[in-house]
Image (cartoon, helix red, strand yellow):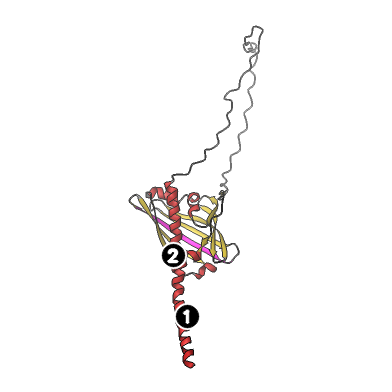
Amino acid sequence: MKLEHTFTVPVGVEQAWRVLLDIERVAPCMPGAVLDSVDGDSFTGRVKIKLGPVNLTYKGAASFIEKDPAAHRVVLDANGKDARGNGTAAAKVTATLVEEGESTRVDVVTDLNITGKPAQFGRGVMVDVGNKLIGQFASCLEGKINAGPEPAVAPAGDAPGPDTVEQQAVPVEDGRAAPPESAPAGAPPAPGPAPAPPAPAASAAPPAPREVHPPSTDPEPIDLLELAGGSVITRVAPLLGALVVLTLVFVVLRRRRR
């Protein structure tokens, strides 16, 4: 199914572009999500979902498959599966940033394919749920932007070492240092130290995926029934109305037979 959502961030488009591409900064703003590792443009994580009495945990991976700084458009491909094997989720997300004065509008188009229990909800319900989740995400992101950039960890400095090797003077009786002895005339010069062998060339191995420090507390799972409350009632209300009418007809017919 295709879902469309829009939200606004209170900064210019260039700053919004940098912020939204900083996965470690924006991931905590996504309800129910935990970022596990980052490897360049790819990352892994988990999303917790609550569906009535059932808790689901989707583990998956995502990667940026397109970044267009000129058009301020980014495409993200993600897929995951329920830890118990009860369902899968795959999405291709396209986000386009549009400058609006001192703010930036973000248009998000999601091509979503899900199986399992969450698939029982139709497109209308998923749009409503997505709007509420995007609203929570945008509010959290606005708070982070207003709080300013996160403090960077200062790199550890190199241990101080001696710049030169101190030469020990040979003491003499009068307390003054004796001058260094000169080589006798005609003697061949002393051989210098042998040159060190060249160091082997370092291999250009790609960096390993970097694990992300987990949050101190797990985020609350996404409660689909709570978020979809109004939509579910709208869908169920006609059925309830029909059941009430059928019940009244049944009661009237029974009374007439008596």
The crowding category of the residue bearing disc 2, from other C-alpha atoms within 10 Å (few below 14, some 14 to 19, many at least 20), is some
Is 39 displayed left or right of 128 in the figure?
right
Residue in the image at 54% along x and 66% along y: 52
> Mark 2 sits on what residue?
128
Q: Which is more toward the observer, 242 or 1?
A: 242
Query: Residue 170's quadrant in the figure?
Result: top right
Instruction: Give the magenta-colored segment's residue range.
Output: 86-99
Can residue 115 be seen in the rendering of this structure? no
Q: CA distance from mark 1 to mark 2?
A: 26 Å
Q: Which mark is residue 243?
A: 1
Instruction: Residue at the far right: name it.
Output: 173
At label 1, the amino acid type is Leu
Q: Which is more toward the observer, 160 or 64?
A: 160
Q: Position of residue 152 (x, y in %)?
A: 50, 41
Is 105 displayed left or right of 87 in the figure?
left
Q: Are marks 1 and 2 in contact (CB under 8 Å)?
A: no
Q: Is residue 77 magenta?
A: no
Q: Position of residue 80 (x, y in %)?
A: 54, 61
Residue in the image at 55% along x and 65% along y: 88
Q: Position of residue 62 (x, y in %)?
A: 51, 56
At label 2, the amino acid type is Asp
Q: Secondary structure at mark 1?
A: helix
